[in-house]
Every structure is written in structure tokens, then in C-alpha cells.
Amino acid sequence: MSTATVDDDASQWTRLVLTGEFDADARATFDRAIADLDVDRPVRIDMRAVTFMDSSGLHALLHLTQIASQRLCLVGISDRVRRILEITETPSLFDLAD
């Protein structure tokens, strides 16, 4: 993953922006970013700039669903990411937004 940055919107949610490839090599970057998340607030994950995601990226998202107090919202997922969610029967675990 090229970057994973946290941006707190004081009025509503915490936004996590992911870019590049979301795979095993990106897990450490993701874990560092979520260490700073306020998991008691709604979390929106902006995935518009994610170019690739494999099962390691999915596992990282699923881990975050377990520690977050509210459902995660995935924003701008690609057709490839949507397909991974469908194959693994996990889209119902997330709110999806364009």
C-alpha cells in the first residue's frame, strides 16, 4: 500500500484513506494507521485509489470490523474489490458507498 492516512472529521466520522495495493505487503502500513483510529466513532474507508486487494487486505478489513464499535463504510470500491467481497460472502459486513 502506498499510503494509509487517518483524517478525523470532528462532526461525523473518522476517514481512513487507502491508496495503491492492499495486500500482505501493505498490512503493516494499515495496522499503523488503524492504531490511531478512534474506533468508537463511525469509520469511513476511502478505497477509491486502491488498485489491487487480495485476501490479506480483506483480512485486515475484517479485523477492523471486530475492533470498531460501529459498522465500517467502504467508499468507492472498485469492481475487483466488490468481486472479492462477493466471492467471500462478506459485503453484508460493510456499508458500501460510491
Image (spheres, helix red, strand yellow):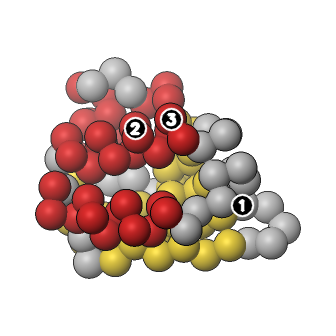
* Horizontal arrangement in the rendering, residue 38 relative to residue 57 (left or right): right
Q: CA distance from mark 1 to mark 3?
A: 18 Å
Residue 22, position as x, y percentages in the image: 24, 59
Secondary structure, mark 2, is helix
Q: Which disc, if any, is residue 62?
A: 2
Q: Is residue 23 above or below residue 3?
A: above
What residue is rendered at 61% in x and 38% in y? 71
Secondary structure, mark 3, is helix
- Cβ atoms at labels 3 and 2 below 8 Å apart: yes
Lower sequence index among marks 1 and 3:
1
Q: CA distance from mark 2 to mark 1?
A: 19 Å
Amino acid type indicated by mark 1: Trp
Residue 46 visible in the snapshot: no
Q: Is residue 41 above or below residue 11?
A: above
Write down the quadrant of residue 25 in the picture.
Answer: bottom left
Residue position for label 3 = 66
Q: CA distance from mark 3 to mark 2?
A: 7 Å
Query: Among all residues in the image, which is located at the extreme right?
Result: 11
* Horizontal arrangement in the rendering, residue 48 relative to residue 68 (left or right): left
Secondary structure, mark 1, is loop
Residue 23, position as x, y percentages in the image: 18, 56
What residue is rendered at 35% in x and 63% in y? 30
What residue is rendered at 26% in x and 36% in y? 83
What residue is rendered at 34% in x and 47% in y? 60
Write down the quadrant of residue 31 in the picture.
Answer: bottom left
Residue position for label 1 = 13
Amino acid type indicated by mark 2: Leu
Amino acid type indicated by mark 3: Gln
Q: Is residue 36 above or below residue 68?
A: below
